[in-house]
């Protein structure tokens, strides 16, 4: 399979980012359609991605298109249902997180009496300003600005797995281990003790 026919379900901010990446930055992907019920988003998708078919609903897309894979970037509440329906159609699925109603955060923050430590990619440029008030830098305003290259890389990996019929570089075990870290940190905070990861990974 040299090239896979793909659609993006939902072209809000994240979906439009994925659609544009598929159209211009991911070798092996052919973006053929998107879904949105809003005319302004349809126009924006065509402007940024070229002439792609636009369907108002997933039902219309399912009825009209022969696809290999989809990116699900619809509203969070629709993710699980969209995944089930696309899987039933036999399509490979890349689902924007979260899969369920729970959200996510890409930061770690430790706050003390005299300051704080933040870990995460907040900055838009490598410029820092140092003055009498302290150290300052700009902030990337949106998730696509902060993680633009990561979004391209993950879609390239997904398409590569579909085209070459190989396992993904990040496995279900990796995902479970990541969730376990968050669960352990929360449990530690509530119980006031160190939590060994083996308690959660057995």
Image: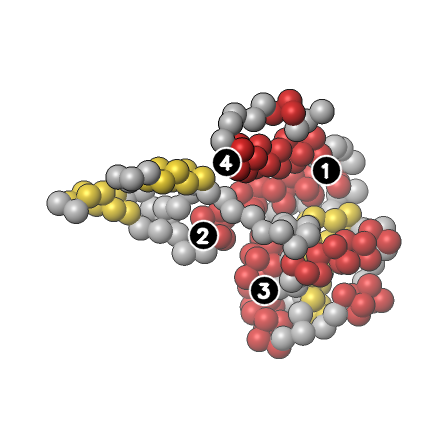
Circle 3 residue? 12
- Mark 3 or mark 2, which has the lower sequence index? 3
Label 3 Cα neighbours within 10 Å, binned few <14 / some 14-19 / many ≥20? some
| 9 vs 117, nearest the viewer | 117
Circle 2 residue? 145
Q: Residue shown at 51%/27% (left/top)?
A: 193
Circle 4 residue? 189
What separation in Å lies between label 4 and label 3 (alpha carbons)?
36 Å
Proximity of marks 4 and 2: CB atoms separated by less than 8 Å: no
What separation in Å lies between label 3 and label 2 (alpha carbons)?
15 Å
Q: Where is residue 186 in the image (x, y as percent from the top left)?
A: 54, 38
Q: Where is residue 184 in the image (x, y as percent from the top left)?
A: 57, 32
Proximity of marks 1 and 2: CB atoms separated by less than 8 Å: no
Proximity of marks 1 and 4: CB atoms separated by less than 8 Å: no
What residue occupies the far bottom of the structure in this picture? 39
Circle 1 residue? 161
What residue occupies the far left of the structure in this picture? 132
User: Is residue 171 among the parts visible in the rendering?
Assistant: no
């Amino acid at each position: 399979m040299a090239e896979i026919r793909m659609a993006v379900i939902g072209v809000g901010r994240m979906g439009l980012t994925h659609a544009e990446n598929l159209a211009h930055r991911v070798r092996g992907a052919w973006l053929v359609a998107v879904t949105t019920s809003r005319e302004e988003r349809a126009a924006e998708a065509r402007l940024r991605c070229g002439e792609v078919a636009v369907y108002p609903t997933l039902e219309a897309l399912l009825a009209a298109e022969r696809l290999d894979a989809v990116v699900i970037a619809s509203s969070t509440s629709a993710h699980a249902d969209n995944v089930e329906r696309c899987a039933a159609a036999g399509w490979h699925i890349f689902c924007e997180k979260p899969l369920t109603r729970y959200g996510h955060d890409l930061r770690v923050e430790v706050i003390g009496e005299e300051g704080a430590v933040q870990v995460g990619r907040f900055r838009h440029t490598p410029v820092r300003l140092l003055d009498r008030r302290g150290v300052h830098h700009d902030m990337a305003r949106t998730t696509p600005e902060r993680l633009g290259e990561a979004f391209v890389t993950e879609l390239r990996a997904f398409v590569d797995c579909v085209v070459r019929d190989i396992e993904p570089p990040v496995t279900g075990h990796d995902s479970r281990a990541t969730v376990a870290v968050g669960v352990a940190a929360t449990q530690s905070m509530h119980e006031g003790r160190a939590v060994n990861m083996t308690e959660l990974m057995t």
